[in-house]
Image (spheres, helix red, strand yellow):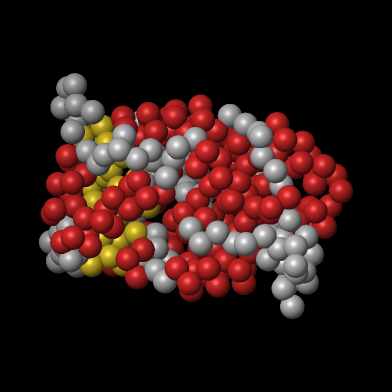
């Protein structure tokens, strides 16, 4: 029976799922004309096709951050799009049910009970410092509380998933009738968080609440680095919060990247060109998709305007 104190689960908070967070080392960047601006996009050549790998920012400010011409050219060139999730076929009601199933404790325990007295007190103090209230999140597990905190804070700052990179491309694909497929299912994506040990979930929430107080500056720095295609700055921005959370890093970054690379190798055996869109930080650092492809003998080249 549902706990009467459970907070409603937001249908779209999966969009805040943390993308890749990796160290800034060992990127393969090809020759770039003098004065050209790099982009958060790489091209990998197969025997008969090209796969463009675009780093996404899931939340952007409406009307401010439009897709660069080179990204639109890669979209035009692609016969199909591949994203973390198959967004054009995602059923909102089914997504809501998945969030409800995974995001609340099956024994009806509250967020306070799951965190324990010490961590809940710390979480409450950090929430207050960020101008947030934990009471509406009383009925969700710590990992989902972390996602909701991120989403609520981004919304307060004017960022919107409907303006993010994926949704801009979904709109173009709907207009043009282009196929979109996913690298993983919503169950797989959220399950990676739900299966985290309790201590890791608590640390994830506490770090998210700490970051929430300075999220405006952090996100602006990330978006600036994204516009420049500055892989090292992007990796540094996101790596800081993961340095002390190796389990979270492995489960959400390394393991998923390995699974995706296997699928990308299949795409590189195809004849169609593809545009693959994943969180930007899945594409930077020594454990990134780019680094794994390079170690497998591929030669990703970073795009530029």
Nearest the camera: 50 or 37?
Answer: 37
75 with respect to 211 (left or right): left
118 with respect to 213 (left or right): right
Please identify the residue farthest to the right as the structure is shown.
117
What is the x, y in percent for residue 177?
Answer: 18, 66
**Quadrant for the C terminus in the image:** top left
Please count the marks in the image. 0
Residue occupying the point 18% across, 41% down? 70
Residue occupying the point 42% across, 71% down? 91
Nearest the camera: 40 or 106?
Answer: 106
Residue 232 lies, with reference to residue 248, above or below; the image says above
83 with respect to 105 (left or right): left
What is the x, y in percent for residue 87?
Answer: 36, 63
Please identify the residue farthest to the front as the structure is shown.
4
Residue occupying the point 58% across, 51% down? 147
**Could you say which quadrant of the image residue 172 lies in?**
bottom left
What is the x, y in percent for residue 60?
Answer: 39, 40
**Quadrant for the N terminus in the image:** bottom right
Is any atom of residue 231 visible in this view? no
163 with respect to 174 (left or right): right
Nearest the camera: 291 or 297?
Answer: 291
Residue occupying the point 62% across, 31% down? 213
């Amino acid at each position: 029976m549902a706990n009467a104190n459970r907070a409603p689960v937001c249908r779209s908070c999966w969009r805040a799922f943390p993308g890749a967070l990796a160290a800034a080392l060992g990127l393969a960047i090809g020759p770039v004309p003098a004065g050209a601006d790099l982009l958060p996009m790489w091209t990998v050549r197969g025997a008969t096709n090209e796969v463009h790998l675009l780093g996404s920012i899931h939340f952007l400010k409406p009307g401010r951050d439009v897709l660069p011409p080179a990204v639109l050219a890669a979209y035009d060139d692609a016969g199909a799009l591949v994203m973390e999730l198959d967004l054009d076929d995602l059923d909102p009601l089914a997504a809501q049910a998945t969030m409800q199933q995974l995001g609340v404790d099956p024994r009806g325990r509250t967020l306070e009970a799951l965190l324990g007295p010490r961590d809940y007190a710390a979480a409450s103090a950090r929430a207050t410092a960020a101008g947030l209230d934990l009471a509406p999140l009383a009925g969700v597990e710590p990992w989902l509380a972390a996602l909701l905190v991120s989403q609520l804070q981004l919304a307060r700052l004017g960022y919107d998933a409907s303006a993010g990179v994926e949704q801009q491309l979904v709109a173009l694909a709907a207009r043009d009738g282009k196929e979109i497929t996913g690298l993983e299912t919503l169950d797989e994506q959220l399950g990676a968080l739900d299966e985290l040990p309790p201590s890791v979930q608590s640390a994830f929430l506490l770090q998210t609440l700490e970051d929430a107080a300075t999220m405006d500056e952090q996100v602006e720095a990330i978006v600036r680095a994204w516009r420049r295609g500055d892989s090292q700055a992007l990796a540094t921005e996101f790596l800081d919060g993961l340095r002390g959370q190796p389990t979270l890093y492995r489960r959400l970054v390394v393991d998923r990247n390995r699974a995706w690379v296997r699928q990308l190798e299949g795409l590189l055996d195809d004849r169609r060109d593809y545009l693959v869109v994943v969180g930007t930080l899945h594409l930077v650092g020594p454990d990134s998709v780019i680094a794994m492809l390079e170690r497998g003998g591929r030669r990703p080249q970073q795009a530029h305007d």
